[in-house]
Image (tube, rainbow, N blue to C red):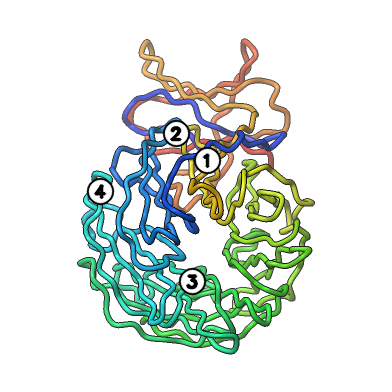
Amino acid sequence: MAASLASLVFSVAGWAGDCPSLKFSAPDKFPVGASPISIAVADFNGDGKLDLAAANQFSDDISILLGNGNGTFLAASNYPGGAYPTSIAAGDFNDDMNVDLAVANSTDPGTVSVLLGNGNGTFQAVVAYETGPTPGSVVIGDFNRDNKPDLAVANYINATSGTVSVLTGKGDGTFHTRTNYGGGRYPESLAVGDFNGDNNPDLAVANNIGGTATVLLGNGKAAFQLFDSFPVGPDAESVTVGDFNKDGHADIAVVNDTEPGSISILYGLGDGDFRPATNHATAIYPLSLETADYNEDGFLDLAAIDDSGICMLLGGSNGQFQAAMNFNAGLSPFSLATGDFNGDARPDLSVANYMTDGSVSVMLNMCAGPRLEIAHVPANSTVMISWPAPSTGFVLQSCSDLGIGNWQPVTEMPTSADGRWTVVLPASGQPPRFFRLRMP
């Protein structure tokens, strides 16, 4: 992760560098409602600490766990969320800078519930919008490029058909009536990405029956056309998007709920088309799928829930993945979500435990490696950026915008003293800069 230097002077220690041995803490359980099935991560009360929202399928409600910033959470507050919720997503639907929630409810007719946040960790009463029958997944994107969040919902109608409902947002927390698009057979999961490089958000759909990933290309006006369906493994269950081979094109990863299980990677060609799937083995019956750089080596990794707990594939150069690593996740894990829950800038995991006593488990990333430190030296109005020597192979990099990235090696020359490498910069007159250590 990165440490920041701005015109305001402060001191901070941030994670940096390649994790030599990826580890997670033992699962720490926090009670929620009955049979949590999906988790959203966001800061619901504006205190700068990540919180959790769990959709509870058997109690028909949403549990809000406010984070303490150290990996623990306050007791859950519960809100009605709709009948038989299956998926939850967080975004700001009314442009008030407070985080809101959208919940897909697997009924017939199906609905998506919207809960507007008050900014203090509480939520207003549910407003429901009709979707297609039995929705199983909801995602957020600006599908008509009007800077107002929209919703897309995957509806698994029956064994032979399914749809994707798109509800465009009005910007005031309400949504227009849905428009439906074909989504393949038994669509289970959705993800948003730009697969043809036109800067319009597209949709990837994991279809459980037939084992395909369907790509719907968006035209930037909230309309979608079916581009193609690409074979993956049987019983496709969950989909995520990332640039796994770092070629600038969005790729698709799908987890296949079979015995034995697998994760299929579709490498994008940048024109909406994809190479044939590359498959990686997991334990049996994998479910939810997430992507993040869990070991901080600059390459995206994949994490899935499977019969062993959490199965993780560490990414590398050219989109290659290592053999699966497994971590204990407690009893009956069903889905997972990623966030930094203890403020150490490492990606942690949260797990919804579906068939147990109703809980969410949190597993903290326990990586160890060289730390990048930033400290102000008032005596000469400088800022010192330092890291432990020898740190062989690591390079100090800098960028001015974390959203864009474009990390480059710093031009300032480090000096070595007292077992540390140090770069010295003026404390004032600096534009915002972010720093990290990386092993190229």
Determine whether label 2 and label 4 are within 8 Å by CB.
Answer: no
Relative vertical location of residue 107 with respect to residue 240 in this rendering, above or below: below
Relative vertical location of residue 184 with respect to residue 55 in this rendering, above or below: below
Determine whether label 1 and label 4 are within 8 Å by CB.
Answer: no
Q: Residues within 10 Å of mark 3 (few under 14, many from 20)?
A: many
- First along the sequence among labels 1 and 4: 4
Q: Residues within 10 Å of mark 2 (few under 14, many from 20)?
A: some
Examine the image and state in which quarter residue 81 appears. Answer: bottom left
Report x, y in % for residue 159. 59, 85
Q: Which residue: 64% across, 55% down?
A: 304
Determine whether label 2 and label 1 are within 8 Å by CB.
Answer: yes
Q: Distance from label 2 to label 1 (Cα)?
A: 8 Å
Q: Decide which of 245, 171 is in the foreground and name it.
A: 171
Identify the residue position indicated by label 4 in the image.
Answer: 122
- First along the sequence among labels 4 and 3: 4
320 with respect to 356 (left or right):
right
Q: Which residue: 47% across, 69% down?
A: 137
Examine the image and state in which quarter residue 200 appears. Answer: bottom left
Identify the residue position indicated by label 2 in the image.
Answer: 72
Which element carries disc 1, helix, strand or loop?
strand
Identify the residue position indicated by label 3 in the image.
Answer: 136
- First along the sequence among labels 2 and 4: 2
Q: Residues within 10 Å of mark 1 (few under 14, many from 20)?
A: many
Identify the residue position indicated by label 1 in the image.
Answer: 362
